Image (cartoon, helix red, strand yellow):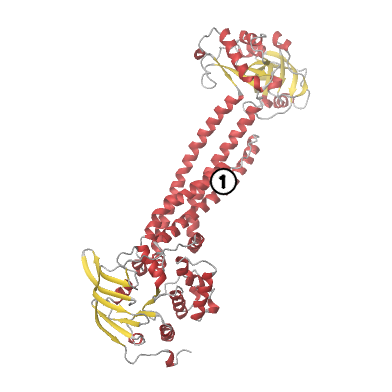
Amino acid sequence: MVLKPFHSSMDFKDIFKIAFIGLSTHRVRSILTILGIVIGITAITIITSLGDSAQGFILGELESFGTNSAFVIPGRTAFGGENILTDSLREKDVEALAKKGNVPAAELIVPFVFGPAKVIYESEKYYSSLLGASPGNKDIDDLELAGGEFINEEDVIQKSAVIILGSKVKEELFGSSDAVGQKVKIKDKSYRVIGVLEPKGQSLFVNYDQVVIVPYTTAQQYILGYSYIQRIVVTASSAEKLPGMVRDIEETLRDSHNIENPDDDDFFVQTPEDAAETFGMITDVLTILLASIAAISLVVGGVGIMNIMLVSVTERTREIGLRKALGARNKDILLQFLIEAVILTGTGGIIGIALGSILTYVSTIAILHFTGISFPFSSPVSGALLGVSVSTAIGFIFGIYPARQASLKSPMEALRYE
Amino acid sequence: MSLIEVKNLKKIYEDEGVQTAGLNGIDLVIEEGEFISVVGPSGSGKSTLLQVLGCLDRPTSGRYVLSGKLLDSYSDNDLAEVRNKEMGFVFQAFNLLPRLSVSDNVKLPLIYGGVKEPERTEIAQKVIDLVGLTDRADYKTSKLSGGQKQRVAIARALVNNPKIIFADEPTGNLDSKSGEIILDFFQKLNDAGHTIVIVTHESYVAQSAKRMINVRDGRIESDEVVKNRRIVGRDGLIK
């Protein structure tokens, strides 16, 4: 007659308690063991949450252009096509877009150019960025004047020699004295200062404090020496009309350029949404790349844990033997050591997330302090979830082998172990 | 039905191809309520016999019937259950977990047996009282004397109310006074109906049992009733 005994199982709570005692017995070793995991998870947390911050920052900047404007860019794509066909947008395109009926949803049509310029006032000179603007730039770039006025339609038509100075340019050239009405020189031509901008600070692409603004027609003729246009911003009366407007712009320009197949387009119409998507993709790829590098440190940490667990199992052979003699089954011993490993890595993960969040917060403050760019601090929720699950998984993966070794020890051999 | 019945029990160790016999054909019957001492020179196989009887090790061949159940086909986990429910162990080196309290050490078999709180604490407290360590229940076992440690071990062996207690040189690491206290405990436990098997190489320990088995070269050389048995408590060494 073979009567198998009835298996009663032990509480999970008890296994946890046993594992905790096992770990607290070797406190220093436990702390050193999880260091690798802490560093890895810290790195991942910083990278993912700074990635989120960067994305948030870029999206915020793009939104400042308004959600109902479209950018017309010369060349085949938004990026990379700039070297060829950059002269494809001309004044006639602006006229075609402005023609009523071609793009009915268009409210503002703002062509502009940009480049470098050396501005001279008496003995002072300043190397600034030049914006060859339309009157509409004041709205789309959200510019405020500290004094004077912005360029008007007449200035564009007349190619007037008038200029508006960024706050920093004004300060460098004129100090505290009034600039409006004075004359500055660019490429030996005199320009009358008609306005000064309010300080605005760094935006995504431009620092408006270091910029000077002239009519785009003036910039083309006297400063840049070409007649094409680098950007045309077209704003729609509402965000809903944007997609239709983009199609109208494309058709108008194809017509103007005698293009029949859209594949041959020598221009590109981009909405802030498109740009956000592209930037989002770039930051995502960067984040994943950096996070995978950080993940290597997690693997190294995991191997370290396995190593220490194996030592621990050997060292505690007598304990294992005793537990088995008292009725612990293989499963009980396996779980004890596996849970020890998971507690170790899980704790390492939580510490890493806390450390990573603090460091991220500190670095957003540092970025604000040193560059003036206000990076939004995004609480690293996705990074935290990733960190906890990854570190727990590492505990399982690298803990299972030592735990199995422990569970398979025969009670007698283990008890006899010196 | 006998408590334990083994027939032609053999245990052969193999180390780098060299075979040595630990047990060389043991036939033995143990009835409930017996108090047996197993003696023999070192290397005789007396400890091996205890380990095989205690299900800590499997015999290479032979039959082992415990309370009418043939253990041959039992898995490792089944044997763990048998050790947990039906057996108690006392070792020479105490084998307590030093970081745990007396109470937590005593509770270990209950934890693996699936006994839940608060019942667990109640049962543990009873056996701790029984071995006279009531006021030491919360002490870490590393803070106890050798004699006290062995009493904790006895409490732990008793906590699951086992059918049989195996003790391997239980007085080997103790001074003679502490050793006598431990022997007195075993005798009292036996008086209360517990079956006890003690392995020892000291004749005064062996003389405290009721039946003495002499093992040599893995075989039972003699198996006799102890004449002039020492009754420890009566010697006035403990209360």
Residue A390, how many percent across, how many down?
49, 46
Q: Quadrant of the N terminus of chain A?
A: bottom left
Instruction: Depth check: give the residue in front, A44 or B149.
Output: B149
User: Where A412 sits versus B209, above or below?
Assistant: above
> Residue at the spot x=45%, y=66% of the render?
B112
Instruction: Depth check: give the residue in front, A410 or A375.
Output: A410
User: Where A121 sits versus A92, above or below?
Assistant: below
Q: Residue furthest left?
A: B18
Dot 1, crowdedness within 10 Å: few (<14), some or many (≥20)?
many
Kind of residue indicated by mark 1: Gly
Would residue A32 appear left or right of B93 to someone viewing this image?
Answer: right
Residue A68, how many percent across, how many down?
66, 22
Residue B174, how many percent across, how many down?
41, 81
Q: Element under label 1?
A: helix
Instruction: Depth check: give the residue in front, A262 or B223.
Output: B223
> Residue at the spot x=63%, y=35% of the render?
A371
Return the chain for callout 1: A
Tag 1 residue:
A356
User: Where A320 sits versus A226, above or below?
Assistant: below
> Residue at the spot x=56%, y=46% of the render?
A356
Would residue A7 appear left or right of A207 to someone viewing this image?
Answer: left
Q: Residue A125 lies in what quarter of the image?
A: top right
